[in-house]
Amino acid sequence: MVSRRRFCSLSAAAFSLPLVASASEGGAIPLKFGHRQANMVEQTGPIVFEIARRIRGLSGVELQMIWKGQDLSDHETTLAYKREANRWAVQVPSIAGIWSHGESIFNIGSARQTIQRAIRAAELLGASVILVALFDANCPNMSDESSYGPVVDLLQNVSSEAADAGVALGLETSLTPADDKKFVDLVNRSAVRIYYDATNKELAYPGQSVPGIQLLGQRIVQIHLKNEDRLLSEPAKVNWPAALRALQRISYQGWYVFETKHQNPEQCVLATQQNIDFVRTYSA
């Protein structure tokens, strides 16, 4: 009999492997589409799942840990979301927004507790990814070991808890793709990978967003897709057809999570359906 810890460690190890369906399983694994909660609705609460259910092809919502007074550290709040997700048959693939105002990854003790709370919430919700945002002053300098060393140690220490919960920590940083690679390779834990936002990379490092996908490969655990308030098919900073083809080349099998701005729920429904169709066109 396989222990729970052993089962979870085997599952976590599988994060680093390409997932390819056999012909007997019906060919390619279906694409999975989600949307960031804070871009779908203006208020907190499980109503977001009802809106998600109206979007053809959308099966997940990325919840915000801390947002407008919402805190998924509260057990009852998380249970309320879980009940409504089950009611509307919508998954929670990931949670984001884990930091309170003023928190920093460099405050190691507080950061550890924050990540641990996020792991507990993710496990209860059945989420497989936690977006750990590390931007600007909250991002380690990969040229300075005194900056990145303590963060690497922290992530190594919490990675076993994440793996035991069946969760991966997805680091979304303001680093170059090459430094993202250096970062997760130093951590060297299968439950610590990269949450990739091609638009953010392109804005910070023009011309590196699409090559960055190939460079990081299976280190990418999940992705955000956005084009401000426009459709992905409209003029964009990122060459989305090329980016989507690059994701296919690295055998990406994670969720495609939209982070598009919307005017209202009705426009969200229509625009997201069009974006899903666009992604499918270039991911065949």
Image (cartoon, rainbow, N blue to C red):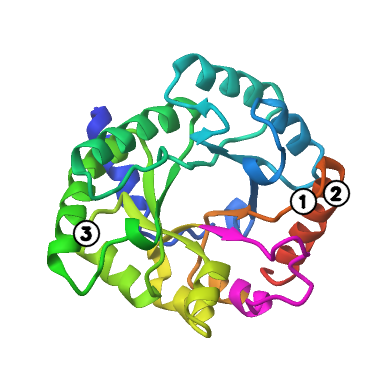
Up the image or down, 132 lies above or below 70; here it is below
Residue receiving disc 1: 262
Q: Which residue is drawn at 48% across and 81% down?
A: 208
Query: Dot 1: within a 10 Å radius of its alpha carbon, few (fewer than 14), some, or many (20 or more) residues?
Result: some
Camera-nearest label, 1 or 3: 1
Q: Where is residue 221 in the image (x, y as percent from the top left)?
A: 44, 56
Residue type indicated by callout 1: His
In the rendered structure, find residue 244 and report the number of the disc placed on it: none
Residue type indicated by callout 2: Gln
Which is nearer the N-term, disc 1 or disc 2? 1
Residue closest to the eye, 26 or 214: 214
Q: Is 197 on the left or on the right of 130, as rendered?
A: right
Residue closest to the eye, 19 or 178: 178
Which is nearer the N-term, disc 2 or disc 3? 3
Q: Can the viewer see residue 190 in this picture?
A: yes
Q: Do the residues labelled 1 and 2 touch (CB within 8 Å)?
A: yes
Camera-nearest label, 2 or 3: 2
Query: Magenta span has 190?
Result: no
Q: Which secondary structure, mark 2?
A: helix
Q: Can the viewer see residue 2 in this picture?
A: no
Q: Position of residue 107 (x, y in %)?
A: 22, 44
Residue receiving disc 3: 188
Residue receiving disc 2: 267
Residue closest to the eye, 230 or 35: 230
Q: Is 265 on the left or on the right of 217, as rendered?
A: right
Q: Which residue is drawn at 28% across and 48% down?
A: 105
Query: Dot 3: within a 10 Å radius of its alpha carbon, few (fewer than 14), some, or many (20 or more) residues?
Result: some
Which is nearer the N-term, disc 1 or disc 3? 3
Q: Position of residue 142 (x, y in %)?
A: 24, 70
Q: What stretch is highlighted in magenta?
A: 223-244
Judged by its main secondary structure, the magenta piece is: loop
Q: Which secondary structure, mark 1?
A: loop
